[in-house]
Image: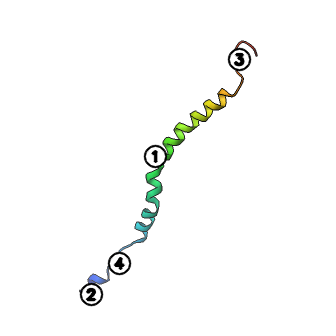
C-alpha cells in the first residue's frame, strides 16, 4: 500500500492548459471579428476619400 502513495502526478501541465483554455477557445471568434472589421474600416476609409477617375 505504501508504494501506491509514492506516485506523484504532474499537475503543473494541467494547470497551464486550464489557464490557456479560455484564450484558445476564444481565438477563432477573435480571428473572425478581425476578418470582418478590417474590410469594414477599409471601406469606411475609402468612402471618405475623394476618388475621381476623370480628374487626376
Residue most extreme to the top: 54
Label 3 CA crowd tier, 10 Å (few <14, some 14–19, many 20+): few
- Under circle 1, the secondary element is helix
- Under circle 4, the secondary element is loop
Read off the residue under disc 1: 28
Q: In the figure, is residue 32 to the left or right of 54? A: left
Query: Compared with residue 30, is residue 21 higher up or lower down, i.e. above or below?
Result: below
Q: Position of residue 55 (x, y in %)?
A: 75, 14
- Under circle 3, the secondary element is loop
Earlier residue among tags 2 and 4:
2
Earlier residue among tags 1 and 2:
2
Label 4 CA crowd tier, 10 Å (few <14, some 14–19, many 20+): few
- Marks 1 and 2, how far apart in space? 47 Å
Read off the residue under disc 2: 2
- Marks 2 and 3, how far apart in space? 85 Å
Q: Position of residue 6 (x, y in %)?
A: 32, 83
Query: Compared with residue 26, is residue 5 higher up or lower down, i.e. above or below?
Result: below
Amino acid at each position: 500500500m505504501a508504494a501506491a502513495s509514492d506516485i506523484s502526478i504532474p499537475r503543473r501541465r494541467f494547470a497551464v492548459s486550464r489557464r490557456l483554455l479560455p484564450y484558445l477557445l476564444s481565438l477563432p471568434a477573435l480571428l473572425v471579428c478581425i476578418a470582418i472589421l478590417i474590410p469594414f474600416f477599409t471601406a469606411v476609409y475609402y468612402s471618405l476619400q475623394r476618388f475621381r477617375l476623370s480628374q487626376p
